[in-house]
Image (cartoon, rainbow, N blue to C red):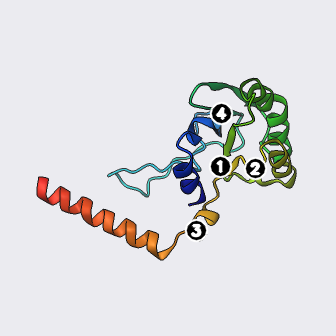
């Protein structure tokens, strides 16, 4: 919720955010879908077999309103140290070219390598007060009863509009 208030206070904030993520691609065609949900009307209990420990490639990418920061490819498992090395040697030099005013905000998801102490220390020094952690536990803790009431009222209103307009 803190981020929501920051966006309300600074309408240009999202223009300065660098969004980042990484994904694992397997040579055998398996997709690492830890963040992916597939909704289907078919049998949800169907299982697919795949070969374990086949060759894979990890890809990191970041983007802003203005630019896609070239993908970074890693053949090894992304640990906290590997992630920190990638930030320092690959992404941050590119960001330095664009961030002459020290305004860039860096977003990362809640993957375990992102929460290594050294990674957090580095981001605190490189983006003081300007890096965004998207970890669900912190967001859930900020939900208030008033927010839930407001969402409920908005949902009721939308259902009313749908009923009226058919």
| Residue hosting label 1 | 109
| Residue hosting label 4 | 62
Camera-side residue of 15 and 41: 15
The numbered mark, 3 or 1, whose residue comes first in the sequence reads 1
The numbered mark, 2 or 4, whose residue comes first in the sequence reads 4
Residue 85 x/y as whole percent = 85, 37
The numbered mark, 3 or 4, whose residue comes first in the sequence reads 4
> Helix, strand or loop at disc 2?
helix
Which residue is at a point 69% across and 41% down the rendered structure image? 106
Closer to viewer: mark 3 or mark 2: 3
Which residue is at a point 67% across and 46% down the rendered structure image? 108
| Residue hosting label 2 | 114
Label 3 Cα crowd, 10 Å radius (few <14 / some 14-19 / many 20+): few
Spatial CA span between label 3 and label 1:
18 Å
Label 2 Cα crowd, 10 Å radius (few <14 / some 14-19 / many 20+): many
> Helix, strand or loop at disc 4?
strand
Tell me if residue 166 can be seen: no
Asked whether the residues under the numbered discs 2 and 1 touch, taking CB atoms below 8 Å apart as contact, a structural biologist would say yes
Residue 13 x/y as whole percent = 59, 42
Task: Determine which of the numbered discs, if any, sits on residue 142 in the image.
Answer: 3
The numbered mark, 3 or 2, whose residue comes first in the sequence reads 2
Spatial CA span between label 4 and label 1:
12 Å
> Helix, strand or loop at disc 3?
loop
Spatial CA span between label 3 and label 2:
21 Å
> Helix, strand or loop at disc 1?
loop
Farthest residue, direction front: 9
Which residue is at a point 87% across and 50% down the rendered structure image? 118
Label 4 Cα crowd, 10 Å radius (few <14 / some 14-19 / many 20+): some
């Amino acid at each position: 919720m803190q981020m929501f208030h920051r966006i309300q206070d600074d309408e240009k904030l999202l223009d300065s955010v660098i969004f980042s993520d990484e994904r694992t691609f397997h040579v055998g065609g398996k997709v690492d879908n830890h963040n992916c949900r597939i909704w289907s009307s078919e049998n949800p209990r169907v299982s697919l077999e795949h070969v374990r420990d086949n060759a894979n490639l990890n890809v990191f990418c970041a983007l802003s309103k203005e630019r896609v920061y070239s993908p970074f490819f890693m053949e090894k498992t992304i640990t906290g140290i590997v992630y920190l090395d990638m930030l320092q040697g690959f992404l941050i030099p590119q960001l330095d070219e664009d961030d002459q005013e020290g305004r860039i905000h860096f977003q990362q998801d809640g993957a375990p390598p992102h929460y290594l102490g050294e990674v957090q220390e580095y981001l605190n020094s490189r983006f003081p007060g300007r890096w965004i952690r998207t970890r669900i536990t912190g967001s859930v803790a900020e939900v208030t009863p008033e927010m839930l009431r407001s969402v409920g009222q908005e949902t009721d209103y939308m259902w009313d509009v749908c009923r009226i307009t058919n």
